[in-house]
Image (tube, grey):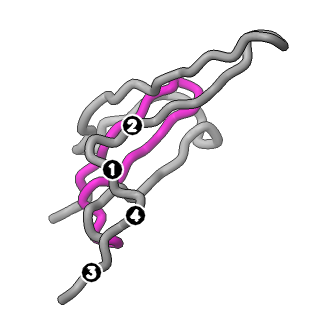
Amino acid sequence: MYYELNPNHQKPFKKTKVSSIDNDTMILIEYKDRGWCNSGVKHCECPSEYKDTIDNSLYKMRGTDVVTICDRCNSFVHTDMSD
């Protein structure tokens, strides 16, 4: 079976954002990689409206590396969704 490569796949996955301190100052915030989070362990206690999920699998729709990003904590975790 053939699967298309997922264009979202990055190894290693990295995330940054630009934030403004005041009208003249902008800073680049690098998100912290908290590693692999399996067996029902929670990423953080932040509400779901701050979180986003990206399929970072090498093969599209295979779900082997799902990344959960929290914009409030500025961090992310990986979850292995494979069997």
Look at mark 1 in the image and give the residue it sits on.
Answer: 10
Vertical placement of 73 versus 67: above or below?
above
Question: Among all residues in the image, which is located at the extreme right?
Answer: 23
Label 3 amino acid?
Tyr
Magenta-span inclusion, residue 39: no
Label 4 amino acid?
Pro
Asked whether disc 1 touches disc 2, contact meaning CB atoms under 8 Å apart, the reply is yes
Disc 4 to disc 2, C-alpha distance: 14 Å
Look at mark 2 in the image and give the residue it sits on.
Answer: 14
Q: Position of residue 37 (x, y in %)?
A: 27, 38
Q: Position of residue 56 (x, y in %)?
A: 35, 55
Label 2 amino acid?
Lys
Asked whether disc 3 touches disc 2, contact meaning CB atoms under 8 Å apart, the reply is no
Look at mark 3 in the image and give the residue it sits on.
Answer: 3
Q: Position of residue 32 (x, y in %)?
A: 39, 24
Vertical placement of 23 versus 36: above or below?
above
